[in-house]
């Protein structure tokens, strides 16, 4: 009598299958586990592998049963996958396992399957390409950001103003609370508005005290809306001074001959970035419309693993992982769907990057950097980035194929 499988339910990529293993099959699995134990265990008074089966069973009964169960679960999983020709996305979960002497072993297998993706529609879509024109205001804003990076902090007289950096002692609650020193840039959101207002009213060295109400959107929910007595003493005020925007500044920033040359370089860089962002927007619009027109399920285990990998990469503290997962899950699922669409089109249309594509891209980079292609190849291989380049090349080919079949303006 063989293992019996009874489908219980299916939802999306999940399959629930009830498994019943006959008594004789369970007995055979236990005998096999017992023989393995008998051939390897060491018991006092017996040579290795020579202990009687009855003694081994009595001494290692629970371990033998556990090994038999694990073997039967593996066998059932392999058999149902082969019998149903399932493409499994992750290792199965076992639920409601019942294992009683003289009775069949029963349990429920929870499987997640790889999504079967059939892209019935990949053409006929219309997307918008963002404007890539760089304005004088954008150039001016970027130059101001560069000036801000080169700014210096100098001691300032009088009360602090928005944008100043202060070193301030702050305490809340009763008079016994010890004041702590904090460096704060006013207006940057480091302190709540009520405390910033109190700081800007205080002259250096002056102690000011008054009730301050905590905002209703304060991150710590337990403190939202509370009113506390706050005491501040400003120890030091520093004010930022940015260098003048002239030819000297241009030379210090990047060895430019003049301010005009710096502006030209900034405009070129902004234009390059705008083109890159516009291309990314076009690609995302295409993917979003294809996903909307071709429904398919995504295994929850893939989404969970994606979230866990990013939580680890971002070093998210354990007590914040649940919140991070809740905020990040939708983006993770969206990224997985994007990857699956690209993979499906690449396979179906023969667009996967070839060795020649890879060699040509490496040769192109080598020429730009004036180095030997073998050197770049070795660097990519050592850093594990060859696959990343291969995926990038495949994506480029897939999106070229999509843009040829959809309404995509060359320029806005």
Image: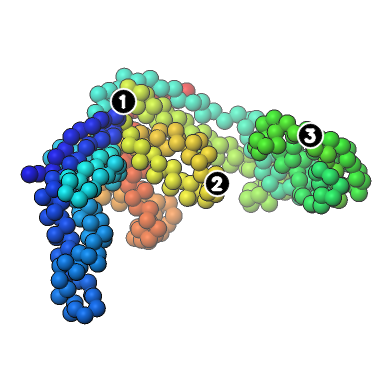
Q: Quadrant of the N terminus?
A: top left
Picture coordinates of residue 168 (x, y %)? Answer: 82, 48
Q: Residue at x 20, y 55 (%)?
A: 68
Left or right relative to 262: residue 297: left
Left or right relative to 208: residue 46: left
Left or right relative to 34: residue 327: right
Precedes in sequence: disc 3 or disc 1? 3
Q: Which of 263/327 is in front? A: 327
Residue 90 seen in the current view: no
Q: Rounded to the nearest whole Å, what is the CA distance between mark 3 and mark 1?
A: 51 Å
Q: Residue at x 17, y 46 (%)?
A: 103
| Colour treatment of the image | rainbow
The residue under label 1 is 295
Under circle 2, the secondary element is helix
Q: Which of 95/269 is in front? A: 95
The residue under label 3 is 227
Under circle 3, the secondary element is strand
Precedes in sequence: disc 1 or disc 2? 1
Q: What number is the disc on residue 319?
A: 2
Precedes in sequence: disc 2 or disc 3? 3
- State which quadrant residue 304 falls in: top left
Picture coordinates of residue 133 (x, y %)? Answer: 54, 28
Residue 263 seen in the current view: yes
Q: Which of 236/8 is in front? A: 8
Q: Rounded to the nearest whole Å, what is the CA distance between mark 1 and mark 2?
A: 35 Å
Q: Residue at x 30, y 51 (%)?
A: 359
Q: Rounded to the nearest whole Å, what is the CA distance between mark 2 and mark 3?
A: 27 Å
């Amino acid at each position: 009598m063989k293992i019996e499988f009874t489908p219980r339910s299916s939802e999306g990529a999940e399959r629930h299958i009830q498994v019943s293993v006959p008594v004789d099959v369970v007995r055979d699995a236990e005998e096999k586990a017992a023989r393995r134990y008998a051939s390897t265990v060491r018991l006092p008074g017996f040579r290795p592998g020579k202990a009687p089966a009855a003694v081994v069973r009595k001494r290692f009964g629970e371990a033998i049963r556990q090994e038999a169960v694990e073997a039967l679960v593996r066998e059932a999983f392999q058999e149902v996958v082969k019998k149903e020709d399932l493409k499994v996305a992750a290792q199965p979960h076992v639920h409601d396992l019942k294992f009683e002497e003289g009775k069949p072993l029963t349990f429920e297998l929870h499987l997640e399957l790889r999504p079967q993706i059939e892209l019935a529609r990949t053409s006929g879509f219309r997307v918008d390409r963002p404007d890539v024109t760089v304005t004088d205001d954008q150039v001016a804003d970027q130059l101001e950001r560069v000036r801000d990076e080169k700014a210096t902090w100098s001691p300032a007289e009088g009360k602090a103003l928005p944008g100043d950096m202060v070193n301030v002692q702050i305490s809340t609650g009763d008079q016994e609370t010890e004041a702590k020193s904090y460096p704060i840039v006013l207006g940057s959101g480091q302190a709540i508005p009520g405390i910033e207002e109190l700081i800007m009213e205080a002259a250096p060295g002056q102690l000011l005290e008054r009730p301050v109400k905590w905002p209703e959107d304060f991150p710590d929910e337990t403190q939202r809306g509370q009113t506390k007595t706050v005491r501040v003493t400003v120890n030091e005020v520093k004010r930022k001074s940015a260098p003048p925007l002239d030819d000297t500044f241009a030379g210090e920033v990047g060895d430019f001959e003049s301010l005009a040359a710096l502006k030209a370089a900034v405009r070129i860089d902004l234009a390059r970035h705008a083109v890159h962002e516009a291309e990314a927007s076009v690609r995302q619009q295409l993917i979003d419309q294809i996903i909307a027109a071709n429904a398919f399920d995504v295994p929850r285990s893939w989404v969970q693993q994606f979230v866990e990998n990013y939580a680890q990469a971002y070093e998210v503290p354990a007590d914040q992982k649940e919140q991070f997962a809740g905020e990040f899950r939708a983006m993770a699922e969206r990224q997985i769907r994007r990857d699956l669409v690209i993979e499906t089109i690449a396979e179906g249309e023969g667009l996967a990057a070839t060795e020649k594509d890879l060699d040509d891209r490496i040769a192109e980079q080598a020429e730009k950097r004036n180095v030997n292609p073998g050197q770049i190849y070795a660097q990519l291989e050592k850093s594990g980035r060859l696959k990343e380049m291969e995926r990038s090349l495949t994506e480029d080919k897939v999106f070229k194929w999509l843009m040829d079949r959809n309404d995509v303006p060359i320029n806005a």
